[in-house]
Amino acid sequence: MNISLYVITLGLLGLSYFRDKNKTKKALKKSWKAFENILPEFLVVILFVGILMAFLNHEVISKIIGADSGALGVFLASIVGSVTLIPGFVAFPTASILLKNGAGYAQIGAFVSTLMMVGVVTMPVEMKYFGKKLTIYRNVLAYIFSLIVAVIIGMVV
């Protein structure tokens, strides 16, 4: 599957280059700059997860956010997700690592959904553009929805 996606991507890149060399070069330069901007965040998060996994063994993770941690584990995972600023392409591999090391599905559901939807760290910027009232409403509703998602995941899985 991955190889076919690479082949399709390279084929479309070749088609783009054939149609307009300058636009394709400009797009490749832009994407490289975006990659350079994302790379430091990505490396810091991977380093953080690596250090975290070195200190927190399977038993500790299971105790804090394992399936048996119940509502408290969901709450703790949702708080960590709400205040953490991690891009999605790092959040999902992190969730996978945590699951493999004993985290519960409902807890990871709460963590990832709050990580993606609740933005405590980004609230000042959001308030600047959307206003205080809308920002608070959006974040509170996103947090409640994340808890609902966690409960549903907990019931289904």
Image (cartoon, grey):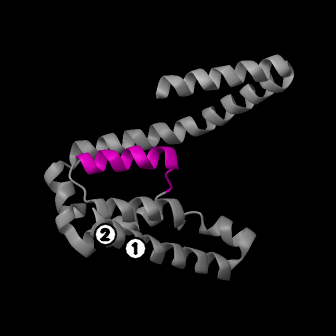
Above or below, 96 against 67 in this view is above
| Residue 101: image location, x then y, percent | 22, 48
Question: Where does label 1 land, which residue?
Answer: 147
Count up the numbered dots. Answer: 2
Q: Quadrant of residue 71?
A: bottom left
Q: Which secondary structure dominates the residues rendered in magenta?
A: helix
- The reply, left or right, for residue 73 in relation to residue 11 is left
Q: Is residue 40 magenta?
A: no
Q: Who's the residue at 27% across and 61% down the image? A: 157
The residue at the point 22 percent across, 63 percent down is 64
* Residue tagged 2: 74
Q: Nearer the viewer, residue 7 or 114?
A: 7
Label 1 amino acid? Answer: Leu
* In-image side of 24 versus 70 (left or right): right
Disc 1 and disc 2 in contact, CB within 8 angstroms: yes
Helix, strand or loop at mark 1: helix
Disc 2 crowd, CA 10 A, few/some/many (<14, 14-19, 20+): many
Query: Badge 1: few (under 14), some or many (20 or more) residues near its Cα, within 10 Å?
Result: many
Q: Residue at x 48, y 27 (%)?
A: 2
Q: Which of the two labelled residues, at mark 1 and mark 2, occupies the earlier sequence position?
A: 2
Q: Residue 25 got which mark?
A: none
Q: Amino acid at mark 2?
A: Val
Q: Nearer the viewer, residue 50 or 100?
A: 100
Which residues, given as a range, are shown in magenta?
85-100
For this orientation, the residue located farthest to the left is 59
**Quadrant in the picture for residue 31:** top right
